[in-house]
Amino acid sequence: KAGVTQTPRYLIKTRGQQVTLSCSPISGHRSVSWYQQTPGQGLQFLFEYFSETQRNKGNFPGRFSGRQFSNSRSEMNVSTLELGDSALYLCASSLVPGQPKSFYGYTFGSGTRLTVV
Amino acid sequence: EDKVVQSPLSLVVHEGDTVTLNCSYEVTNFRSLLWYKQEKKAPTFLFMLTSSGIEKKSGRLSSILDKKELFSILNITATQTGDSAIYLCAVEAWGGSEKLVFGKGTKLTVNP
């Protein structure tokens, strides 16, 4: 069973640019959540998508946006990059919202390491 | 606002030692507490705890939840170098959202 796939694995961007990250969930999983992980703040929730709809959003500026496609793949976009956006961006997938988050109930991808210079 | 605090933030031990990692939380409408191990990138699931006083065990790892005092501990006995990782605690609330609130993690280093 293929896991959650995030691309690209690494990315270096310049301040002011924009970036798009991709997350393909486990086959059959329809819910995708995104997190930002930094050494100072730990993992922080960005947003979640189900059935192409954003269901919940964390406390991040409007420069952070996302979407989900009909095949459940999700993308997140960060515009006007700042140095502080350098982080590991993780996504997690689940079958549908509200399922218990035990072993395969909520699975993380390996993330995209974004460095802003 | 929901909050998770883990302690210590960093821990260095020798192989064979036993360690206890702590997690305290504040969450409205608690549903579950989860422990994850993060070695390189992807956090991997360890335990999900929903009821007080029931120990979950997997090999040398065990965890328990106290819903009255709002904390959980993760124990690792006879540590090995392969246990070196960041251990993450997260809480989930009822309400249908997939959002987890994480602590900042405990970085465990096990030296040979």
Image (spheres, rainbow, N blue to C red):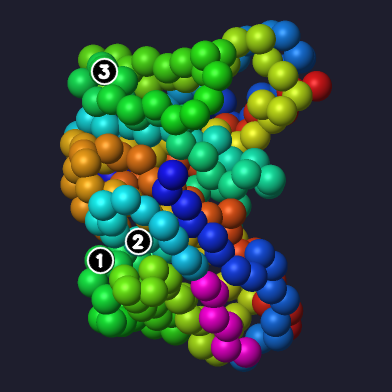
Q: Which of the chains bears the disc numbered 1?
A: B
Contact between marks 3 and 1 (CB within 8 A): the answer is no
Residue B19 lies within the magenta run: yes
Secondary element type, mark 1 = loop
The answer to whether A81 is drawn above or below residue B81 in the figure is: above
The CA span between labels 2 and 1 is 6 Å
Q: Can residue A15 be seen in this view?
A: yes
Residue at image position (68%, 15%) is A81
Q: Which of the chains bears the disc numbered 3?
A: A
Q: Quadrant of the C terminus of chain A?
A: top right
| Residue A53 disc label | 3
Q: Which amino acid does label 3 sit on?
A: Thr
| Residue B50 disc label | 1
Residue at image position (54%, 74%) is B21
The CA span between labels 2 and 3 is 26 Å
User: Does mark 1 fall on the same chain as mark 3?
Assistant: no
Count neighbours of disc 1 (C-alpha within 10 A) and say few if under 14, some if 14 to 19, many if 20 or more: some
| Residue B30 disc label | none
Chain part drawn in magenta = B17-22
Quarter-of-image position of residue B79? bottom right
The residue where tag 2 is placed is: B33
Q: Residue B39, how many percent across, how many down?
A: 58, 58
Contact between marks 2 and 3 (CB within 8 A): the answer is no
Considering depth in this image, is A101 or B26 the residue closer to the camera?
A: B26
Residue at image position (26%, 17%) is A53
